[in-house]
Amino acid sequence: MKLHVKTTINGEEFEFLCEPRESLLEVLRDRLGLTGSKEGCNNGNCGACNVILDGRLVNSCLVFAAEAAGRAITTIEGIQGPEGLHPLQEKFLEHAALQCGICTPGFIVAAKALLDRNPDPSEAEVRLWLAGNLCRCTGYDKIVRAVLEAAKSTAVVMEK
Amino acid sequence: MKNFAYINAASEKAAIESMSDKALALAGGTNLLNLLKEYVLAPEALVNIKGIAGLNAIESFEGGLKIGANVTLSELLDHAEVRGRYPALHQALYDIGTPQIRNMSTLGGNLCARPHCWYYRYEYFDCKKRGGQGCAAIAGDNEFHAIFATDGPCVMIHPSSAGPALVVYGAKVKIAGPGGSRDAGIEEFFTLPAAAVARENVLKPNELVTHVLLPPPNGKSATYEVRHKESHDWPLAMASVALTMAGETAQEARICLGAVAPVPWRAAAAEAALKGKVVNETTAGEAAQKAAEGAKPLSGNKYKVQLVRTAVKRAILAAATGRRV
């Protein structure tokens, strides 16, 4: 039997039908066409599927789509503002904090959740927070630098 | 994953009425979803217990805390009283999984999580826990398995990192079932494979952990964990310690090991060795030697015996000094 789920994704209301066994990641990608969230390990290790669910960073591969009912989800597609790229996205580009790119949406969503919680993190805090995201290309340094720089630039915007 | 019926339980009573050996409780899901994906478990129904009122709160209770089973590890880590009064629990939670995992995982789920033994998790290996005849871990790759109680039918390590801390604080587990609610001491809650190899605790299929009751802390406490990686890893060995101090002397000591036995493993000989002693490097080291007594490691995990000594010594010193060692 299919379940009828109503939820809010990136500020927009969505309705879908899904089987109980479908993960939120599967529904985002295969039913709703939001393919920015990636499937890496599909078991909670890699963070490529990260989304923000009611303000909390989660692995969407470990959440059933049925559990999205009545909740608010932010995916990588919702990070960009009306005025263009989010500072995190700009800094990732500036610092070349990606190579193959498959981990990037997960990193940016995770970093967004960090800055929402802690706008001025130390390098150690960034590294600890990103422990649940795997990148096999960059060696992480450029990613950490991009997040720290984005934190500085959002702080400047807020001061203005 | 085999499909299943999805049941939203609005109350403890509704959840208990729906639960059976074929209808499992779903809380944070970080443990359960992977077991379903790997076909280790294939229930006919899942009973979502996250909507049950009253299981999401941390409340003051008889000078201690009453923690709802659905409280997430992140919520516990952010709680001032957990951080300030229960450092052994806070330090144990701090190193679990990743921020994402801690945002989803619940305290009840941490206590009820199924083992991460790779033979249990892989359907093509023999495993008594899955109804098989033998244990592939005994002759196989067992570097991450138990070193205590290894003469039983299963050499898993219990996956709960919160368990040892709850043991040293003398916590109780509130269990709801068809006949009402009962409190079990945390040490009685966990059961050895020799008692019932298919499960890891006293819960019957239609019983639910609803709360953890923490008595007021009685002294100083700490947890020390040894692991390969600083980020995102399972412990290889861990120790939680609670000391009742009179000046620099330990009047009482409670010491419990994690990741080395099928249950959180109380180190009674180490407690006796420390009791009445001034706590310093020497006495902590002597207690640590006692903690490893009785270990019967498997072919691939003799290294864990020394890790137990290290974890116990450092946890004792961290508890006594209030500093991470």
Image: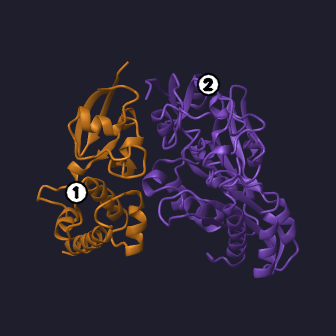
Residue B297's label in the rendered image is none
Task: Tell me residue B87's x, y (percent).
Answer: 63, 66
The image shows residue B144, relative to residue B182, as above or below, that is below
Whether residue B105 sits left or right of residue B219 in the image: it is left
Reading the image, the residue beneath label 1 is A100
The answer, for residue A91, to whether it is visible in the render is yes
Q: Which residue is painted at 75% across and 54% down in the image?
A: B265
Task: Tell me residue B297's x, y (percent).
Answer: 73, 55
Residue B21's label in the rendered image is 2
> Decide: marks 2, 1 in contact (CB < 8 A)?
no
> How is the structure coloured here?
by chain
Residue type marked 2: Asp
Mark 1 falls on what kind of element? loop
Residue type marked 1: Cys
Task: Tell me residue B201's x, y (percent).
Answer: 70, 39
Of the pair B265 and B74, the residue shown nearer to us: B265
In the rendered image of the structure, the colour used to display chain B is purple
The image shows residue B3, relative to residue B196, as above or below, that is above
Q: Quadrant of the N terminus of chain B?
A: top left
In the rendered image of the structure, the colour used to display chain A is orange
The answer, for residue B60, to whether it is visible in the render is no
Q: Chain of mark 2?
A: B
